[in-house]
Image (tube, rainbow, N blue to C red):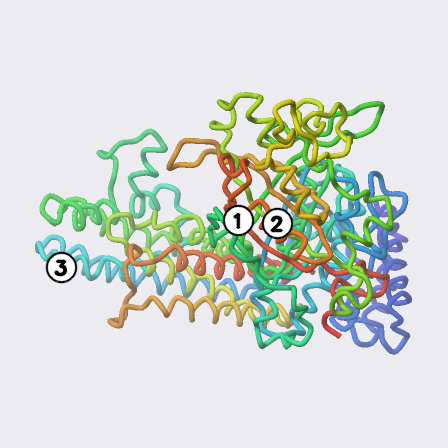
């Protein structure tokens, strides 16, 4: 007790001398400390964003499903990449549901890794296969119905998610990791080759988290805000080179090795400073 | 419970005071707060480190010449060629400043930054060298010709005339992906993980400011005789580096390797040129070549390393000697003969590499990461031209990658890598 009292006196003096002393008075530990910073406003804002994205996701999925069931192949193909973007933007939250996420977004390769087969395959990528490989919507009506049901369930369950600062900080880096491991390799959309849409949406999702946390980060490290602003803008500028002129993106197949290298490097250059947003968790 | 906490608190308090004292920030300076203090320290918030003479298996960072040139060759290398992403001279200088303090720490066998206590951010050091000592790590930095082509850095007037892309040599099959580069980092150590860790952390510390163009890991093994390292063998089993200048002799090194005053641009005095060549060695064809033919290709005996017709590795190469039928003992197309005829010397510091299989042929992707140091690239060019089409070794090797870098002189305390180039 006695020593604690002494420490707090020194802390008070420390604050007068220099703002940084307060931090040092806290016992250091090698493990994750409980956040003492109040980020309620930020987590609320992020949840709001996720819910808006989910609302749009359900609406767009509805349109997609209707096109599939109407047998309108071209319309379904046109809606497919943009509808998915709402999902990709809010992936840190969508991913919290271990059962729903694969039902909506699994690739056949993901299932095969788990020892499952084609019969267990549902969701967007299953229909992607139908649209681009089988070149038909016929036979995919039930999958479409199920997809809409799952999308609606996801929307309802997002309501219940407890958004923590950790989820946001980790989520933003995870979004970039998604890009680095599957989008940049063209492994996400192996039939439609619309990987750049997912790419863009993942970046937008990460940027949203940064925007929400920006003020708090700025108080700790203004240079980090500056760097991230610059890196996001460089990333977006680079991606804009691959727009198709009709509000979308060119096919992944049109990218050269030089293109994917440049994109990959831009993601890594953004990811490194992004991973330091956690400084706001230091008390 | 409260006692250890308090102890840590006081420890930290003291270290902060020391830092303030070290960096010369007086009482008024304290008011500038954390960010202000950070700016006078290096990027990781620590005072400039110094060589730790007590560190185990340590090579000194500061000195008249960079490490990794005259230093005894260790068993491993990780060589990286980088391009510069930043657009101003100031940012380029900052990269080298950052690398200066990190290099000292790495060569002390220390992590590049304090262990983070915040579980929400990644650690400053990537960590894989924890528990390992410095393993005789050396770090050698150089700049390539293309850096001087970039007007934004304003270095054109500092460009030595000899710093230009190496010419095309007969039989070169260079892959642009492993050719050239604006900056090189040569990390050598007696532990492959220590060498890799060093490059990885140097690049990570300037993430977004440079991009990795190509890199190559390599290895060497030294037979020991009477506790003395013998000349290592390449993957063709022949000794590599026998004819090297004596790195312990000032005269030899000044004659062959170090750039003396007035021999090039002033910023390079005490520096040298590094030639890197990735030479694929066709192991399958070599292995089905008769021993006599192999020895005639090199002009040396395989096991002893002696020149043909001689007994000992270091016996003088005799170009005039003829056999009973009047033919030269050292064949006209042998590698060692041609090198000797070039009439110039270089310091060879090569490493073998083995990087899996070449998809298109199913053969080993293996060979030599040839590295040589010389005060003028012309020394290497002269030898390589002499090999030309004549060298019998050409049948068994293909040059796939090539780069030339001007390596800075040694770094003095208080200065940073390459300072003379920028000022």
Judge whether B308 appears above or below A249 on screen: above
Q: Which residue is mark 1?
A: B401
Q: Secondary structure at mark 3?
A: helix
Labels 1 and 3 in the same subunit: no
Mark carried by residue B356: none
Q: CA distance from mark 2 to mark 3?
A: 54 Å
Q: Are marks 1 and 2 in contact (CB under 8 Å)?
A: yes
Mark carried by residue A74: 3
Label 2: chain letter: B
Q: Using a 10 Å C-alpha cutoff, classify the residue at mark 2 as few (fewer than 14 neighbours), some (14 to 19) or many (20 or more).
A: many
Q: CA distance from mark 1 to mark 2?
A: 8 Å
Q: Viewer-nearest of labels 1 and 3? A: 1
Instruction: Name the residue located 69 percent from the left edge and 69 percent from the top edge.
Output: B93
Residue B169: x percent and y percent? 52, 51
Instruction: Name the residue located 31 percent from the left edge and 56 percent from the top edge.
Output: A252
Image quadrant holding the N terminus of chain B, namely: top right
């Amino acid at each position: 007790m006695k020593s604690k009292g002494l420490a707090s006196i020194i802390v008070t003096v420390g604050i007068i001398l220099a703002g940084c002393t307060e931090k040092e008075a806290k016992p250091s530990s090698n493990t994750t400390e409980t956040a003492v910073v109040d980020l309620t406003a930020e987590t609320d804002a992020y949840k709001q964003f996720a819910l808006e994205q989910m609302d749009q996701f359900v609406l767009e999925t509805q349109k997609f499903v209707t096109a599939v069931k109407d047998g309108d192949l071209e319309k379904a193909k046109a809606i497919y990449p943009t509808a998915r973007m709402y999902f990709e933007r809010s992936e840190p939250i969508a991913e919290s549901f271990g059962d729903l996420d694969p039902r909506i977004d699994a690739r056949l390769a993901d299932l095969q890794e788990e020892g499952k087969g084609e019969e267990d395959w549902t969701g967007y990528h299953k229909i992607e296969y139908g649209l681009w490989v089988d070149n038909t919507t016929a036979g995919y009506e039930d999958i479409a119905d199920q997809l809409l049901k799952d999308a609606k369930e996801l929307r309802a369950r997002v309501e219940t998610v407890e958004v923590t600062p950790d989820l946001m900080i980790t989520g933003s880096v995870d979004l970039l990791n998604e890009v680095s491991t599957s989008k940049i390799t063209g492994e996400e959309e192996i039939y439609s080759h619309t990987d750049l849409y997912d790419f863009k949406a993942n970046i937008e999702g990460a940027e949203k988290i940064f925007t929400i946390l920006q003020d708090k980060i700025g108080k700790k490290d203004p240079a980090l805000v500056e760097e991230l602003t610059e890196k996001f803008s460089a990333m977006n500028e680079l991606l804009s080179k691959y727009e198709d002129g009709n509000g979308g993106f060119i096919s992944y197949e049109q990218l050269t090795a030089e293109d994917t290298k440049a994109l990959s490097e831009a993601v890594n250059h953004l990811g490194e400073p992004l991973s330091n947003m956690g400084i706001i968790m230091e008390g | 419970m409260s006692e250890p906490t308090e102890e840590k608190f006081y420890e930290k308090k003291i270290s902060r005071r020391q830092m303030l004292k070290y960096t010369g920030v007086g009482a008024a300076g304290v008011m500038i707060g954390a960010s202000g203090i950070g700016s006078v320290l290096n990027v990781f918030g620590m005072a400039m480190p110094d060589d730790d003479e007590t560190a185990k298996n340590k090579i000194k960072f500061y000195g008249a010449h960079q490490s990794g040139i005259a230093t005894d060759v260790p068993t491993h290398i990780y060589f990286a060629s980088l391009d510069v992403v930043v657009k101003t001279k100031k940012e380029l200088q900052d990269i080298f400043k950052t690398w200066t303090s990190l290099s000292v720490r790495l060569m002390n066998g220390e992590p590049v930054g304090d262990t983070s206590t915040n579980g929400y951010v990644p650690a400053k050091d990537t960590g894989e060298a924890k528990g390992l000592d410095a393993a005789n790590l050396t770090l050698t930095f150089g700049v390539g010709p293309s850096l001087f082509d970039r007007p934004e850095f304003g270095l054109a007037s500092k460009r030595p005339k000899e710093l230009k892309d190496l010419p095309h040599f007969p039989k070169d099959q260079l892959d642009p992906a492993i050719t050239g580069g604006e900056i090189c980092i040569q990390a050598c150590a007696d532990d492959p993980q220590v060498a890799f860790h060093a490059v990885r952390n140097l690049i990570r510390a300037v993430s977004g400011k440079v991009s990795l163009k190509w890199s190559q890991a390599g290895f060497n093994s030294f037979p020991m005789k009477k506790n003395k390292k013998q000349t290592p063998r390449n993957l063709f089993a022949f000794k590599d580096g026998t004819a090297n200048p004596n790195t312990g002799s000032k005269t030899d090194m000044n004659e062959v390797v170090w750039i003396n005053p007035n021999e090039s641009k002033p910023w390079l005095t005490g520096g040298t040129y590094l030639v890197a060549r990735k030479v694929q060695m066709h192991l399958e064809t070599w292995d089905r070549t008769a021993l006599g033919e192999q020895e005639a290709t090199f002009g040396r005996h395989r096991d002893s390393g002696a020149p043909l017709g001689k007994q000992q590795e270091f016996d003088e190469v005799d170009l005039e000697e003829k056999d009973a039928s009047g033919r030269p003992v050292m064949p006209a197309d042998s590698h060692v003969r041609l090198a000797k005829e070039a009439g110039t010397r270089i310091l060879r510091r090569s490493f073998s590499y083995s990087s899996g299989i070449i998809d298109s042929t199913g053969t080993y992707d293996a060979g030599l990461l040839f590295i040589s140091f010389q005060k003028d690239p012309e020394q290497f060019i002269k030898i390589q031209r002499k090999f030309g089409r004549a060298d019998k070794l050409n049948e068994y090797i293909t040059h796939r990658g090539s780069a030339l870098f001007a390596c800075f002189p040694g770094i003095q305390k208080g200065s940073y890598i390459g300072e003379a180039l920028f000022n």
